[in-house]
Image (tube, grey):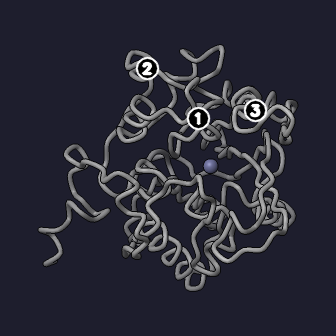
Amino acid sequence: MSAEPNSAHSREGGNPGTKDWVPASAGTSGQEQPFAADLSAIRRLAGLLPGAWPVAVNVARVAASIRPNRFVIEGGDDTSITMPRTAFQVVYPDATLMIDAGLDRETHDSFSAPDRREPYFPEAFARLRKALDAARMIVLTHFHADHVAGVTRAPNFDELARKTFVSVETARCLLNTPHRPHLAMSAEQINRFVIFDYGDYYPIAPGIVLIKAAGHSSDHQMVYIALQSGREILHSVDVGWALANIAQVKGKAAPWVKEDKGAVLGQLRWLNNTLRNERNISLLVTHDDALIEAAITSGMIGGELK
Ligand SMILES: [Zn+2]
């Protein structure tokens, strides 16, 4: 309770409209910042909007980057790690919702030199584009290229934008700090999105709650999904690049990653505690191929888009 006066400096800052994000570099001292999302509040919000809860979650893997493990996690070795670039489809009885949008080949290739191209799966992206077209709504977790370009670079951008929900923070990032130069957008384009503002949690659709988790980027969000089956899925998005980050509470170690390490560390610890204490919750991590493979094998998620 007494923490209130400092709330402007914490993730609980009550008024997002006045939140001036500390530049990521300010947090790179790495001192852990406590993070504590309130699961009971999140569960209550999941049931707030009327309507049937989702029945399934499917994954699309449209590309991958291969990195030595020493970039993925502090203290990692030289083992090569395949990091897929993914988007998720939430299936309702009568509609689908997309979480993130993958990326087109040109955007994927903008991250590598011509002689060192990384895997890209055009058929998977074609299926993802159909799923984006068919979705009732699209939610972007944060502004990074591999999460947004499937919408922002789409030939039918206008059509997709009107059902694409982006937070005020993501809108600002897209406008002010595009992840790649060719992803720059005008204010007029960004205003075609459905832009929303919220405090800590936001019930975006029945059974689905967004959780503010600035750190990986200033606009980064996690996603909680309650399924009709009673199963709960927590999509940790990019807090960690791999389950190992969460299991060991160790951050990423890639020199090019500019994130608020202290904030991320607090979130890794919260995820770690949550996974150990909440047996009903299953975890997703955007870029962990082994975890996604295991989730498909166990039936937790589907490996093909509907
Ligand atoms: Zn990502």
Neighbours of disc 2 within 10 Å: few (<14), some (14-19), many (20+): some
Which mark is first along the chain, 3 or 1? 3
Disc 2, SS: loop
26 w.r.t. 133: above or below: below
Q: Residue at x 79, y 39 (%)?
A: 62
Q: Quadrant of residue 38?
A: bottom left
Asked whether the beta carbons under mark 1 and mark 3 sit within 8 Å of each other, the answer is no
Would you place residue 127 above or below residue 98 in this image? Answer: above
Name which residue type carries label 2: Arg
Indicate whether 131 appears above or below 300.
above
Quarter of the image where the C terminus is located = top right
Residue topped by disc 3: 109
CA gap, disc 1 to disc 2?
Answer: 14 Å
Quarter holding residue 124: top right
Q: Are marks 1 and 2 in contact (CB under 8 Å)?
A: no
Mark 1 vs mark 3: give the one in front. 3
Q: Position of residue 163 (x, y in %)?
A: 51, 27
Q: Residue at x 41, y 28 (%)?
A: 175
Image depth: mark 3 or mark 2 in front: 3
Q: Position of residue 90 (x, y in %)?
A: 65, 46
Q: Is residue 110 left or right of residue 265?
A: right
Identify the residue shown where x is 53% and y is 82%.
Answer: 273
Reading the image, the residue beneath label 1 is 148
Q: Is residue 51 left or right of residue 283?
A: left
- Determine which residue is flagged by label 2: 192
Residue 102: x percent and y percent?
68, 37
Image position of 290 (left or right of 267): right
